[in-house]
């Protein structure tokens, strides 16, 4: 169904910049019953109880005894879940590939879990999605077509989706899961703001559709030498002025869960923090709905462990390096939206929307590659095989078309022209070097500006574009001036990118200069 709610930017503007941050609308310790939840964790092959397996109610964590038994207080309506340890796998639903790690709280029966012994490499890949966000069955078919066309030959240990699985229509959850299951990998999910029912009276009720299908909204699991912490940081603030309000906040219960988890986690394990709303964003640095208010408390719990964090929500790609109190830098990566510009057109010959992201990246996903406690990421475009787009542009609309793809440049317009490189997954540690044939190479400057080809694309898209979609300033564009003494003829612009992890990517653009 259509999105009836204001955008995150509109929420902040409508509040006059003074939107108050509340605490997460979840039950506190005082609200929970003292009735005990009990169960056991067993080896699926032998039926024997497993000792030392951690089980949680989303706030407290306990470990099973020698017979595999556990006991926990309930945490309101929060799911009871097992924290999958390394070397074990949870049974998967064959239709959806969702790991079966949870039960709804029920003191009247034994809530039991089964785990299967498996072999896990310490070097592995993870597919990471953000904001697939189909809002109706037609857009879900776009997603299905893209998965059918884009995932052959990919190998990953599992996949993650960092929220906004759907766009407000929670009846799509079941079909969405079946579509994602066609990738063939176990899939872990956390909720975004569009996955919650904001017509509900409070944050607990808002999460009911999610719990029915996916179980816990915050949980964790291990794989290899890494611990993945899936955090629900969408803070429901209630109804105001006929619409809903939310903000980024992890909250006391979730912080208590992280603290309990890390207290029993070896210091040298890689910690992968996953959430929907970014810890910090460049596109909306003052918007409470686009930043996490208590990020410092979370990062203080992590301390000096090897750690990276990932988010979605923004429909842009951003890298941030957050200064910690110990002087270290924490890497926070906002991932490209799989839906790009919310499945906006124009359409390609197959009838699929181009869905170009607002910051000029193609829609797509990321691959997280882990090697022990080390990691890298790479962007995978749903459409363009390259890691960058090279453009020649002119900011003087009277001198030349704003973006030049196929047209030649007259000699007297060279002074108005620039060459731009949109490095789709670029960030502060990315360097870009360019060289026009016959000229000395130069280091390009990072520029916070809109992608001109994306501006043109959206300007011409007409009714195929969602009404709120527009080109946004991008955090990953580099620019430099063209030499003004280029002779008429064909020229080659060679570009070398060294990405955030030191890997090199190269591409080139052929352009033509003609007489004035």
Image: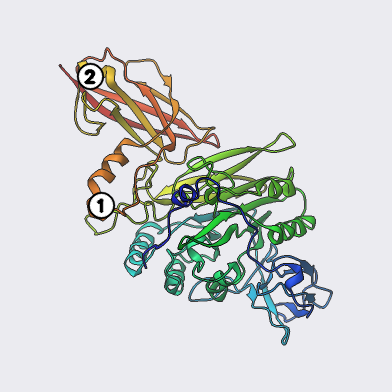
Please name the residue shown 45% across and 46% down the image.
316
Q: Is residue 322 above or below residue 464?
A: above
Displayed quadrant of residue 26 = bottom right
Q: Report helix, strand or loop for mark 1.
A: loop
Residue 18 lies, in percent from the top left, at 55, 47
How many numbered discs, if any? 2
Q: Residue furthest right?
A: 66
Q: How many other residues sit within 10 Å of disc 1, few (<14), some (14-19) or many (≥20)?
A: some
Please name the residue shown 31% across and 36% down the image.
452
Res. 418 in view: yes
Residue 407 lies, in percent from the top left, at 19, 30
Q: Specify which label sits upstream in the sequence, 1 or 2.
A: 1
Q: Residue furthest top?
A: 485
Question: Which of the colour schemes (rainbow, by chain, secondary structure, one colour) is used?
Answer: rainbow
Q: Is residue 406 above or below residue 179?
A: above
Q: Is residue 241 above or below residue 362?
A: below
Task: Report how far apart the C-alphas of labels 1 and 2 lie in the structure.
Answer: 31 Å
Residue to which mark 2 is pinned: 413
- 467 or 79, which lies in front? 467
On screen, residue 249 versus residue 493, left or right, reads right
Please name the residue shown 73% across and 65% down the image.
59
Residues at discs 1 and 2 in contact (Cβ within 8 Å): no
Q: Is residue 449 above or below residue 142?
A: above
- Residue 346, numbered label: 1
Res. 163 in view: no
On screen, residue 502 versus residue 137, left or right, reads right
Q: Report helix, strand or loop for mark 2.
A: helix
On screen, residue 411 versus residue 454, left or right, reads left
- 91 or 87, which lies in front? 91
Residue 328 lies, in percent from the top left, at 70, 36
């Amino acid at each position: 169904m259509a999105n009836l709610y204001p955008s995150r930017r509109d929420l902040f503007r409508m509040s006059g910049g003074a939107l108050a941050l509340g605490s997460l609308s979840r039950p506190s310790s005082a609200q929970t019953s003292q009735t005990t939840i009990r169960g056991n964790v067993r080896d699926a092959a032998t039926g024997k109880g497993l000792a030392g397996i951690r089980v949680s109610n989303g706030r407290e964590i306990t470990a099973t005894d020698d017979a595999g038994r556990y006991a926990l207080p309930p945490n309101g309506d929060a799911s009871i879940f097992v924290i999958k340890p390394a070397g074990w796998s949870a049974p998967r639903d064959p239709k959806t590939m969702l790991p079966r790690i949870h039960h709804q709280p029920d003191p009247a029966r034994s809530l039991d879990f089964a785990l299967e012994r498996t072999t896990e490499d310490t070097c592995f890949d993870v597919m990471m999605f953000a904001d697939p966000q189909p809002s109706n069955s037609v857009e879900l078919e776009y997603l299905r077509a893209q998965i059918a066309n884009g995932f052959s030959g990919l190998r990953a240990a599992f996949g993650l989706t960092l929220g906004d699985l759907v766009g407000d229509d929670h009846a799509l959850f079941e079909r969405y899961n079946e579509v994602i299951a066609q990738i063939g990998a176990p899939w872990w999910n956390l909720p975004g703001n569009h996955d919650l029912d904001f017509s509900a009276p409070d944050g607990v009720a808002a999460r009911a559709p999610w719990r029915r299908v996916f179980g816990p909204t915050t949980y964790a699991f291990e794989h290899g030498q890494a611990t993945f912490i899936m955090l629900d940081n969408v803070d429901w603030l209630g109804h105001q002025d006929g619409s809903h309000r939310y903000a980024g906040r992890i909250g006391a219960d979730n912080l208590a869960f992280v603290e309990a988890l890390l207290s029993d986690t070896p210091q040298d394990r890689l910690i992968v923090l996953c959430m929907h709303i970014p810890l910090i964003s460049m596109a909306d640095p003052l918007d409470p709905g686009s930043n996490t208010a208590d990020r410092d408390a979370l990062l203080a719990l992590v301390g000096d462990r090897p750690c990276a964090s990932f988010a979605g929500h923004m429909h842009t790609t951003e890298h941030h390096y957050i200064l910690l109190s110990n002087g270290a830098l924490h890497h926070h990566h906002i991932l490209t939206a799989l839906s790009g510009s919310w499945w906006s057109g124009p359409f390609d010959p197959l009838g699929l929307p181009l869905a170009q992201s607002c910051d000029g990246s193609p829609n797509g996903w990321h691959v997280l590659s882990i090697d022990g406690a080390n990691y890298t990421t790479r962007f995978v475009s749903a459409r363009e095989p390259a890691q960058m787009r090279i453009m020649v542009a002119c900011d003087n609309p009277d001198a030349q078309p704003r973006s030049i793809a196929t047209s030649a440049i007259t000699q007297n317009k060279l002074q108005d022209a620039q060459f731009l490189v949109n490095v789709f997954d670029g960030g502060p540690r990315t360097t870009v070097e360019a060289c026009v044939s016959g000229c000395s190479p130069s280091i390009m400057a990072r520029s916070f500006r809109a992608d001109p080809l994306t501006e043109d694309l959206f300007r011409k898209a007409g009714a195929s574009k969602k009404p709120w979609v527009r080109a946004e300033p991008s955090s990953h564009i580099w620019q430099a001036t063209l030499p003004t003494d280029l002779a008429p003829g064909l020229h080659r612009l060679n570009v070398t990118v060294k990405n955030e992890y030191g890997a090199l990517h190269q591409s080139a653009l052929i352009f033509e200069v003609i007489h004035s």
